[in-house]
Amino acid sequence: MNQPSTSGNFMGRAVTEFRESGVVNKIFIGMLIFIPVAVVADYAGFPPLLTFVLAALAVVPLAKTMSDSTEALAHHVGPTIGGLLVATFGNAVELIIAILALFQGLNEVVKASITGSIIGNLLFVLGLSMFAGGLKRKIQIFNRVGASASASQLVLAVIALIIPAVFTTTLGGGLAQKSKDDLLENLSILVAVILLICYAGQLVFFLFTHSDLGAEGEGKHAPAEFTPEFIPMEEEAPVWGVARAVITLVVATVVVGFVSEILVGSIEPVTKQLGWTELFVGVILLAIVGNAAEYVASVTAAMKNKMNLSLNITTGASLQMAFFVTPVLVFVGLISGNPLSLQFEEFELVCLIVAVIIVNFVSLDGESNWLEGLQLMGAYFMIAVAFFLHP
């Protein structure tokens, strides 16, 4: 009797999983078709805007795939190591895109993508989550302990990004430009080191010395679940094996790098063709593409009345962007020959400060409703319009 082939078994399992998956997962799986289409568009010399859009659409399902793979690994290795894994790979897509942009000398795009990712998660993703979750409920409760911890870290992140800008403006006119640039580069490196130390301290605090904060509680004063972006798999969902999770993560990472290179390569032609600024592309467009996985996870959690988890996803992604991705990019900039300073434009900093202040006010009472979500989204769209019109 002929034994069924391994490929046949694999295809059978894949078809079964696809049929049993939810509508959202089916949409992400269907979007994988944009990967070969984006490659064809790049090699065939399609218009830059079309290539940019196709590459952006191709990155979205890959980001979801990387998120699912990391989540599956976290499920197998336990909450502590799992939290570290998710913290490491949580913003992998944004990091890959930013590294490729750095090697192409698009430093302003990289810095804009940093602030855009933080602002987008704090205002748009969290706002959409509160709005969607609050439509069927008068209020939703989340834990103020975790929210307070996130708020203090966000303030520290803002301080780290403000200091280089203030430092530069207060140097005076007596120094040569070369000396100013050297001082700014040294300051950026030192701030990056301090950010990494603070990030390591954050992980130690929530994963080891105060791991009890990871317990879900009931009521607004209970400890919050705060393992950075650690999203436990639903109990009823099939959990991937370790081998499958590792292979999928490696393959998805390689493909993301390839597609991201197409995406980054089309940025300059698109900005010239449409008259868009690199600031708008980085703050709005790249941030939306890189955070697609967070959008789905956060909104889904809120609609299931899991506001602790939803808040954890959004603030966790923002904190990781500030405390891990940003300093890593500073050191990558040194290697690439295009040093990345932490001197951000005043308009970016003002918008970032506004986002952190609004989120702090909204999270003070440990409750959310659909109106607060609408307010957060309203603030985001005002900022987005301003960036679009900013010369």
Image (spheres, helix red, strand yellow):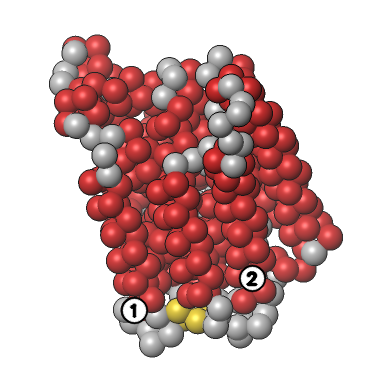
For the point 66% across and 28% down, the residue is: 183
Residue for point 15% across, 21% down: 47
Quadrant position of residue 331: top right
Residue at 63% x, 22% y: name it.
179
Q: Where is residue 383 shown, x and y percent of the image?
A: 32, 56
Vertical side of 341 occupied by 43: above or below: above
Q: Can you give x and y, in whole percent of width and height, for residue 272 in the image?
A: 21, 24
Element type where label 2 sits in the image: helix
| Amino acid at circle 2 | Ser
| Secondary element at tag 1 | helix
Q: Is residue 368 above or below residue 233?
A: below
Residue 148: assigned label: 2
Q: Which mark is residue 116?
A: none
- Circle 1 Cα neighbour tier, 10 Å, few/some/many (<14 / 14–19 / ≥20): some
Q: Residues within 10 Å of mark 2 (few under 14, many from 20)?
A: some
175 vs 364, nearest the viewer: 175
Displayed quadrant of residue 247:
top right
- Residue occupying image coordinates x 30% and y 66%: 378
> Residue 371 got which mark?
1
* Amino acid type assigned to the residue bearing label 1 in the image: Leu
Is residue 371 in view from this perspective?
yes
Considering every residue shown, the one lying at the far bottom of the view is 138
Residue 342 visible, this angle: no
| 234 in relation to 97, above or below | below
In the rendering, at what x and y percent does residue 101 appear?
Answer: 43, 24
Of 57 and 182, nearer the camera is: 182
- Closest to the observer, 267 or 357: 357
Cα gap from disc 1 to disc 2, whole angstroms: 21 Å
Q: Earlier in the sequence, mark 1 or mark 2?
A: 2
* The N terminus lies in quadrant: top left
Q: Can you give x and y, in whole percent of width and height, for residue 166 in the image?
A: 57, 45
Quarter of the image for the C terminus: give it: top left
